[in-house]
Amino acid sequence: MQRIFEWIRSRRCIGILFAVLFACEGQKEDDLRARPNVVVIYTDDVGYGDIGSYGGLIPTPHIDRLAKEGLLLENAYATAATCTPSRYSMLTGEYAWRAQGRGVAPGDASALIRKGRETWPAIMKRAGYRTAVVGKWHLGLGGDAGPEWNGEISHGPLDIGFDYAFIIPSTGDRVPTVYVENRHVLNLDSQDPIEVNYREKVGDRPTGLDHPELLKMRWSHGHNQTIINGISRIGYMAGGESALWRDEDFADIFVEKSVQFMEDAGDSPFFLFLATHDIHVPRMPHERFQGKSDYGFRGDALLQLDWTVGEVLRFLDEKGLAENTIVVFTSDNGPVLDDGYQDMAEERIGAHKPWANLRGGKYSAFEAGTKVPMVVRWPKGIPAGIVSSALFSQVDLMGSFAGFLEASYDKKQAADTRDSWEAFVGSDKAGREGLVQEAIQGVLSYVSRDGYKFIPAHQGPELVPWGTGISTGFSPVDQLFYLPDDPGEKVNLAAAQPEKMEEMKTLLAALRNP
Ligand code: NG6
Ligand code: CA
């Protein structure tokens, strides 16, 4: 016995013990780096308070399950309060506002992300992943002349790192209302070519303005141009009859295409960017969800979204892939009730608060514009049931994955993304030092890790100018809020804390002009 103790006390033994421990640690690290699958469920206009785990009243059991089995981030942000710039930043690692022309893209916009641009999917692809985007694109397609709807569509997802694409080109409420699979409009009859026009009427389809009696859901503002599937849209469209989508089928089709892609990935790890149409307008969920929530079609669309998440989880469970698949659930911007259609979202909202205790909503400089739900589940790498208040920006997803996969990338192009992996997996509870939020009219605010928020003075309307009823957060004077005490951004501390104010101004200015 004595001898054993002596041996244990000897240096050699300690060395061996350390070697074993390090080997175990190293093994663990390698194991974790054994490239997990990644599914990013990027939802549209889902508010901070829309999900059960964040206090929402509409049942979202599958999303709540993700949170229970993983990490819930309390301070995660999209980079912008609208879709196009949020997606742009997340996929390129560069804040969208660094150049002009990256606001909400019209349905015939040319591609905002061009070949040669460093992107998150390109990094994943180089790291050995099969990559796909399924769902809403809204980042433009085609060269400077715009998308070639009737031919081969250039400058699309396949040119910037995705192996497979099945997309709604822009939004559900914009023409053309057709799917694009890889480089072509799906089911297009060459005898009936598509014509799209955002300035004047083309073709003879009726419009929502002239024929509201033909609509199954009426418009409230905008959205009164070509009627397709009983819904009038933004923009005019002729032709393409055989290629038209049925809005009610979006969720089913996106689930089908997603599952097919994951199946087809075989032994390769996969990266799936599943960008749902839900719960953007027009909210026209499948008939089986219509009337199933107590909250009108907005609530029903949320049930459909939760179903979508459930189907993804079911697939992962059935294939035994859940353990080493990272599932991220988040949203591109905050909530809106009336976004242009009379779908009873406002009338039926009841006690449900899509914006939780935050002020503003989609489009706004106030918190509800960009602070979004974000849940990450990865059984192999993240303990179940953690809640973190780390400050996290979606612009960091790219740099974080690059860091984790030890993949190099063009840091000059992707200038704003950082490796925030530890915050992403819940072990760093502090997160980013600060982040920029982009509202409409290009207004940039700054949120810092210590809880302060700065909205620079801006001459602009108090309410979003097109009838959503949402406060913009604009004010002719600088605003400073302390979010931990004042999440609803009611008490402007600019005059009371001039030093803090100056500090925040300087931080934002330094980021704007590095
Ligand atoms: C707005 C639309 C709105 C929505 C938004 C883009 C009008 C009056 N409103 O211009 O309905 O389509 O653009 O939303 O046309 S986003 O989530 O894709 O950014
Ligand atoms: Ca959106």
Image (spheres, rainbow, N blue to C red):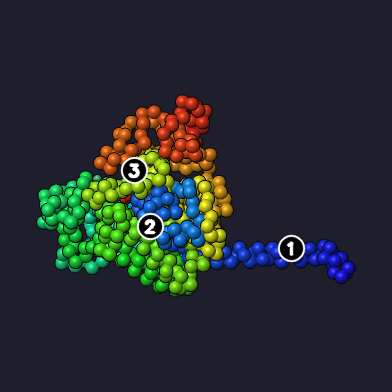
> Disc 2 versus disc 3: distance between alpha carbons?
26 Å
Dot label at residue 363:
3
Label 1 or label 2, whichever comes before in sequence order: 1
Dot label at residue 59:
2
Residue 126 in view: no
Mark 2 vs mark 3: in front: 2
> Disc 3 versus disc 1: distance between alpha carbons?
55 Å
Q: Quadrant of residue 265?
A: bottom left
> Vertical placement of 157 versus 223: above or below?
below
Residue in the picture at 18% in, 62% down:
240
Asked if residue 236 lies left or right of residue 478, the reply is left
Residue in the picture at 46% in, 34% down:
481
Q: Quadrant of residue 164?
A: bottom left
> Disc 1 versus disc 2: distance between alpha carbons?
50 Å
Mark 3 vs mark 1: in front: 3
Label 2 or label 3, whichever comes before in sequence order: 2
Q: Give the residue pinned by disc 1.
A: 18
Q: Amino acid at mark 3?
A: Tyr
Label 3 or label 1, whichever comes before in sequence order: 1
